[in-house]
Amino acid sequence: MAESCNSRGFSWLVKSCFPNPQHETRRGPTLLTRISDKNPPESRPENRHHKHETTFSFLPDDILLECLSRVSPSSLPSVSLVCRKWSQLLDSPGFYDLRRNLGHLRQTVFAVAFTDYGVYATMHRIGDETSWRTTSFPAVEMVAPEIFDGSFSHARLTAIGRHIYIIGRNATIRYDTWTGVITSRAPMIFPRKKFAAAVVAGKIYVTGGGGASRTSAVEQYDPETDTWRVAAESPRRRYGCIGAAVDGVFYSIGGLKIGGVAEATRGVGSEAHVYASSMDLYDVEARAWLRSRAVPGGGCVVAACAAGGYIYVLASHAVELSFWRYDGRRKSGGFGEWCRMKSPPLPAQVRLDSTVRFCCVGVGEKVVLVQAVGCIDDLLRRSGRSCRGLKEGLVLVFDYAAGEWSRGADLPAIIRRAACVCVEC
């Protein structure tokens, strides 16, 4: 079978799963039937016909997977709707492995923006495409309007397989990148915003954030059972932190450092207004916290992500940005080592205050930095400068193999305050 199939070939594929009700089980005399006396009963056409009616759906799972893995990406939404068995096969690890070996999976960046009218998602394959492709879906229909309002203003995105999980304060949405279908999932146990989230071993972990609960619980989400549970208690509370995961370790990076219970109860105090330039490490398998690490050079962490076994951290020092790499490969001799990387090419004299925010996502051997909030042009004008072309939606790509930054395609104008995630689809 060809590596991909066109619409005509796919139609045959689907039709082959079901017998044709108008197909005649017996035909008139033919040359074969006239010489049937010369053939044994089991080889006669009328007896062979029953075996010929065996359909495509009766193939063994491994052969069926091999065939389905070669279907073109545009036909996958239809494949998942044929029957429950096919839908389950498309979700299996074996299907992803076959698609990956055939070169049919690509690292794709999704940026999601939330508005009063719904949710806009745009996708882009770094290095393969020159522009973003934007779609929209009325996510407000998936949850009650009173819950949707404000619940996703600071949502976090994670990806498991082809699914993107959009985790808001009071609701969770799953977005299927193949079919475009969205479904409502179980919300977190403790409502929170500006928290850290990452995927470890097929499960989602969240910690930190603020809200009425003021919890230090680390929650774990199981996508198979659609349930949340408390996995651990964090050693410190962080507000506005960023999540990442490497080699079975869940990282909670940066954010506002909130100290003891007394400070949290008062809701005031100097500790609540200091950005933490450190990160906490939770070993998921051992269910234990490792020694916390400080980000070199101080400053406030404004973006972070995991890529290629490393944690990449972007820190702001009011007048400049610094870019760091942390070795998260625990089996390597360099675990825990920091290395300063080349800073992103932004105007050096711009004061990077709270009006400018970034989103960082790892894509294969690259790190994609997106200016998610704020307009650098406004900061330049306030400083008396006249530089154009650096508005919200700027995309910079860091190739960590070459150690160089390059300019990517800017986000579409409709995508503002975007949250980003990388999906292999």
Image (cartoon, rainbow, N blue to C red):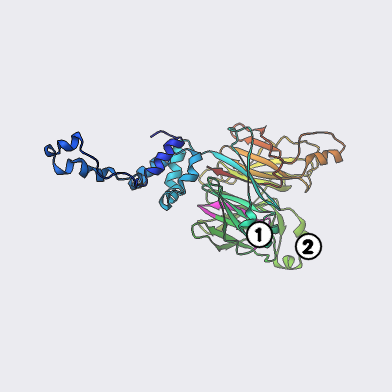
List the residue tagged with mark 1. 169
Which secondary structure, mark 1?
A: loop
Disc 2, disc 1: CB below 8 Å?
Answer: no
- Identify the image quadrant of residue 210: bottom right
Reply yes or no: does residue 197 show up in magenta: yes
Circle 2: residue type: Gly
CA distance separating discs 2 and 1: 25 Å
Q: Which residues are magenta?
A: 191-203
Give me the disc on residue 269: 2
| Nearer to me, 274 or 95 | 95
Query: Taking the image as drawn, is residue 167 in sight?
Result: yes
Residue 149 falls in which quadrant of the image?
Answer: bottom right
Name the N-terminal-most of marks 2 and 1: 1
10 Å neighbourhood of mark 1: few (<14), some, or many (≥20)? many
Note whether 225 is above or below 105 in the view shown.
Answer: below
Residue at 60% x, 37% y: name it: 366
* Residue 200 horizontal/vertical position (percent): 53, 52
